[in-house]
Image (spheres, rainbow, N blue to C red):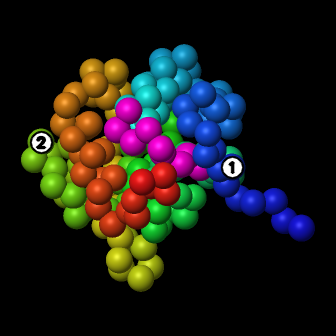
Amino acid sequence: MAEPAGIINRYGPKDDAAFREIVAAATPEIQELAHAVRRVIYEVLPQTVEVVWPKQGSVGWGTGPKKFSEQFAYLMPFKQHVTLGFYYGGELPDTEGLLPNAGGRQVSGRLAMRSMKLTTLEQVRQPALRALLHEAVRHKVPAPASQ
């Protein structure tokens, strides 16, 4: 029997073993940045379902484990930044212009993915990012199971 592609964390921010593995190869600064993003995600949606994708080197967050229908954001650590992406980013109100105007689409053409590079903790702490995350949680993602 094949192993599942993603490691599902339904237990919240204290269960961070799989997340730590994804960022382990990054510099301490990038690890700190990734953990700061994760904290904001859980502050915005405490019931977040986190899915770590070891082969992709990414982590996704949503109200369930399904990447394109229940998840609203993802993170990938890189050498000098973390990428924070939004599956429906092109459809979100982004009054501060945090996201680029162009991005990827799923083969079906349904997704308007957008992502941003974060290089500083100040970027993670900005109110506009938190507002964007709140919008992402409400946009085309089912309500959390506990509601």
- The answer to whether residue 76 shows anywhere in this view is yes
Q: Which residue is mark 1?
A: 7
Q: What residue is shown at x 25% (from left), y 37% (from top)?
A: 129
Q: Amino acid at mark 2?
A: Glu
Query: Crowding near pointer 1: few (<14 within 10 Å), some, many (20+)?
Result: some
Q: What residue is shown at x 29% (from left), y 57% (from top)?
A: 138
Residue at the far front in the pictured view: 147
Using the numbered discs, state the Cα–Cα distance from disc 2 to disc 1 in whole angstroms. 33 Å
Q: What residue is shown at x 56% (from left), y 36% (from top)?
A: 12
The quadrant where residue 21 appears = top right
Q: Nearer the viewer, mark 2 or mark 1?
A: 1
The quadrant where residue 127 appears = top left
What percent of the width, then of the height, locates residue 62? 46, 53
Is residue 5 left or right of 94 when viewed as pictured? Answer: right
Element under disc 2: loop
Give whichever of 14, 76 is nearer the camera. Answer: 14
The residue range painted magenta reads: 43-51
Task: Point out the image quarter for the C terminus.
Answer: bottom left
Is residue 137 left or right of 38 when viewed as pictured? Answer: left
Q: Is residue 99 magenta?
A: no
Q: Which residue is mark 2?
A: 96
- The answer to whether residue 63 shows anywhere in this view is no
Element under disc 1: strand
Q: Is 134 located above or below residue 143 in the figure?
A: above
Of marks 2 and 1, which one's residue comes earlier in the chain? 1
Q: Amino acid at mark 1?
A: Ile
User: Could you say which disc has been placed on residue 51 in the image?
Assistant: none
Q: Is residue 45 magenta?
A: yes
Query: Crowding near pointer 2: few (<14 within 10 Å), some, many (20+)?
Result: few
The quadrant where residue 3 appears = bottom right
